[in-house]
Image (cartoon, helix red, strand yellow):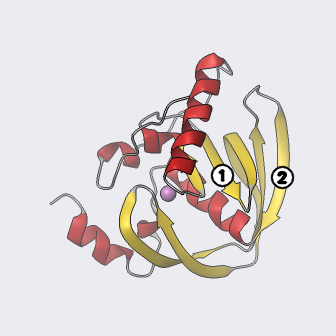
Amino acid sequence: MAKRKVLKFPDERLRKVSKKVTEFDDELAELLDDMRETMYANDGMGLAAPQVGVPIRAVIMDISGNFFEFINPEIVHAEGEQEDEEGCLSVGNFNDVVKRPLKVTVRAQDRLGYKYEITGEKYFARCVCHELDHLDGILFIDRSKNGKEYIKKYGKK
Ligand code: NI
């Protein structure tokens, strides 16, 4: 395993739509292991592959000690609403309030390609929405209360 460099806003690569994973091979396993090491080394709760410069639809999360890997994830059901602060390893020194669903069901594949579904709420739901946004080039500052000001201040002129 090796730590990888986390891209920071306003890096253009964070704004790309990531590609679907079609090969469930050693390269994918190595990337996921590296992402795990990188996330824990940075005290993150979640990390998406495009954040380490690999534009594929893969994310990992740790919610209260429970580790998740989602390949080609989709939110197939969402309900309720919650508001809380978020931060991001790709957005330095800024936390802000974002509105998210309270509960989501995710359909995804594991690192071997097996399909599964999982439902969770609160932090789980918040984190899923945040990480899946990364796969579409969306950052929490695009959705947060004071994000526009942050983008204006630190985005590319
Ligand atoms: Ni993030």
Q: Quadrant of residue 71?
A: top right
Mark 2, residue position: 118
In this rendered view, identify the residue nearer to me: 73 or 87.
87
Q: Quadrant of residue 29?
A: top right
From the top left corner, tell me how far across and down residue 138 is, in percent. 46, 56
29 vs 48, left or right, is right
Tell me which residue sits at (66%, 58%) in the image: 128
Rendered-image quadrant of the C terminus: bottom left
Tell me which residue sits at (76%, 25%) in the image: 112
Vertical arrangement, residue 25 with respect to residue 21, above or below: above
Disc 2 within 8 angstroms of ligand 1 (CB): no
Mark 1, residue position: 61
Tell me which residue sits at (47%, 36%) in the image: 3
From the top left corner, tell me how far across and down residue 144 is, in percent. 46, 75
Vertical arrangement, residue 26 with respect to residue 71, above or below: above
| Secondary structure category for the residue under label 1 | strand
What amino acid is labelled 1 in the image?
Met
Q: Marks 2 and 1: CB-CB under 8 Å?
A: no
The mark that comes first in sequence, 2 or 1, is 1
Vertical arrangement, residue 145 with respect to residue 28, above or below: below
Q: Is residue 20 visible?
A: no
Rendered-image quadrant of the N terminus: top right
Q: Residues within 10 Å of mark 2 (few under 14, many from 20)?
A: few
Tell me which residue sits at (40%, 45%) in the image: 6
Separation (CA) of disc 2 from disc 1: 13 Å
Q: Is residue 118 visible?
A: yes
Task: Please count the marks in the image.
Answer: 2
| Secondary structure category for the residue under label 2 | strand
From the top left corner, tell me how far across and down residue 66 is, in percent. 77, 54
Q: Residues within 10 Å of mark 1 (few under 14, many from 20)?
A: many
What amino acid is labelled 2 in the image?
Ile
Q: Quadrant of residue 70?
A: top right
